[in-house]
Amino acid sequence: MKKPVLDAVILGLCASSLLTQCVSKPQTIYNKKGQPVATALATPTGYVTRQQLGDSTVLTRRLINRALTNADCGKVYEEVTVVSPRGTSVQHRVIVRALPRLELRNETKD
């Protein structure tokens, strides 16, 4: 005879284990001189890179994290958000062609 309380506890432990595996620790990206230029974080909704350029911050969120094919044409590949003292700008990088070389088109989001 199964016990529903025990099943609920086991299900909760499994779910929390999976959620902790989805979010990773931030990684620092360095240039050739060994200076940090950006931080990257893998989240369940995409791969996010944060870069500080003077008084502006650039956030890039990759929405497709798999091998691309030409069937992906027209889909949003990345979302770029620029936060500066003048305001916030959001752009989408849309896939024009994936093979033989990735081509993207920038579209400003309203």
Image (tube, rainbow, N blue to C red):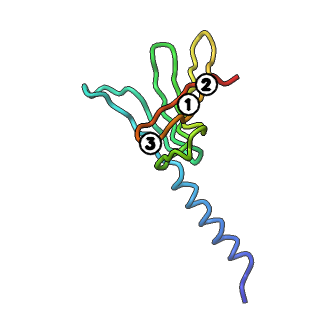
Residue contact between numbered discs 2 and 1, judged by CB atoms under 8 Å = yes
Residue underneath mark 1: 93
Eyeballing the image, is 108 above or below 17? above
- Residue at 56%, 40% in the rendered image: 73
Which of these two is toward me, 23 or 59? 59
Screen quadrant of the N terminus: bottom right
Residue underneath mark 2: 107
Left or right: 11 in relation to 82: right
Query: How many numbered markers are drawn?
Result: 3
Quadrant hosting residue 30: top left
Distance from disc 2 to disc 1, alpha carbons, whole Å, reads 6 Å
Callout 3 crowding tier (Cα within 10 Å): few <14, some 14–19, many ≥20: few
Distance from disc 1 to disc 3, alpha carbons, whole Å, reads 16 Å
- Residue at 53%, 48% in the rendered image: 23
> Where residue 98 sits in the image (x, y, percent)?
48, 40
> Where residue 77 sits in the image (x, y, percent)?
55, 37
Distance from disc 2 to disc 3, alpha carbons, whole Å, reads 21 Å
Amino acid carrying label 1: it is: Arg
Q: Secondary structure at mark 3?
A: loop
Residue contact between numbered discs 1 and 3, judged by CB atoms under 8 Å = no
Image disc number at residue 99 = 3
Eyeballing the image, is 63 above or below 6? above
Amino acid carrying label 3: it is: Leu
Quadrant hosting residue 18: bottom right
